[in-house]
Image (spheres, rainbow, N blue to C red):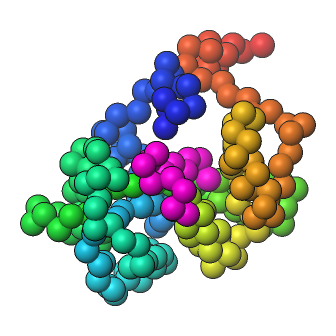
Amino acid sequence: MAEYHGLSQIFTTTETSLYNNLFKSPNPPFHSPTALILEISPNPFPQTNHSTTTNFVPIIKNNYNFDNLEILDHELETYRSKFNGHGHDNSNNCNVYVAGHVLVYPSYNGFFEKPGLFLDQMFVRKCYRGMKFGKLLFSVVAMQAEKMGMGMVDWLVADWNEETINFYEKMGAHYIPEYRLCKLYGDQLQAFGRKSD
């Protein structure tokens, strides 16, 4: 995703930092940074009993035809899931593959009465685009925000990404071109943080 947005030069995330920041939190999902993984398989996913501690029910759709998955996805083995879609070890080769992800965390805006979710990243691998997986991921986030009584979902979109902007506008999102994202990070953050006046 960093490559897609031309941000490889500032990319510092490691597998360890992802694990520590996303999966070691004592807070339940959606009350701290939460990653949702879009997994696909040529085999139907079984319906499972969801955990009552996470307040999240996995969305299972068995209406895609992935019989020729190896033709569609030339990097199939690279993206073989370590888990089988339900948190269990995938060492028995049950053919589950990662097709995308979404990363969200709680947010608050003083202009609105209720808190919301900030959708930090949504990414569908190129070979799976056009299959409505992005819409599926987005609807899961919106559904969860609604279920939790939140008032909004916020996100950013690159100004050059017209196709995505059109998609967001069609779903009813408000695009605010007058605002710009500002970030202070790295050496500049450290230097500014040391200034006392």
Q: Quadrant of residue 45?
A: bottom left
Q: Nearer the viewer, residue 37 or 35?
A: 37
| 8 w.r.t. 157: above or below | above
Choose top left, top right, bottom left or bottom right for residue 88: bottom left
Q: Depth check: 48 or 195 in front?
A: 48
Residue 194 pos. (x, y %): 63, 15
Say whether residue 147 is left or right of residue 31. right
- What is the span of residues highlighted in magenta in the rendered image? 119-132
The answer to whether residue 25 shows anywhere in this view is no
| Quadrant where the C terminus is found in the figure | top right
Return the x and y of residue 15 as percentages of the image width and height.
31, 39
Q: Is residue 172 left or right of residue 105?
A: right
Question: Left of 134 or right of it: where is 18?
Answer: left
Residue drawn at the location 43% of the way across and 27% of the way down: 12
The residue under the point 30% across, 39% down is 16
- The residue lying furthest to the left in this view is 92
**Residue 92 lies in quadrant:** bottom left
Counting from the top left corner in percent of width and height, residue 75 is at 28, 44
Does 77 sit left or right of 197 as displayed?
A: left
Toward the viewer: 56 or 168? 168
Up-down relation of residue 184 to residue 191 (above or below):
below
- Residue 139 visible in image: yes
Q: Is residue 125 magenta?
A: yes
Closest to the observer: 70 or 34? Answer: 70
Residue plotted at (74% across, 42% down) = 162
Question: In the rendered view, would you say 24 is above or below 182?
Answer: below
For the point 84% across and 61% down, which residue is it?
Answer: 112
Residue 154 colored in magenta in the image:
no
Residue 2: x and y, percent? 50, 32
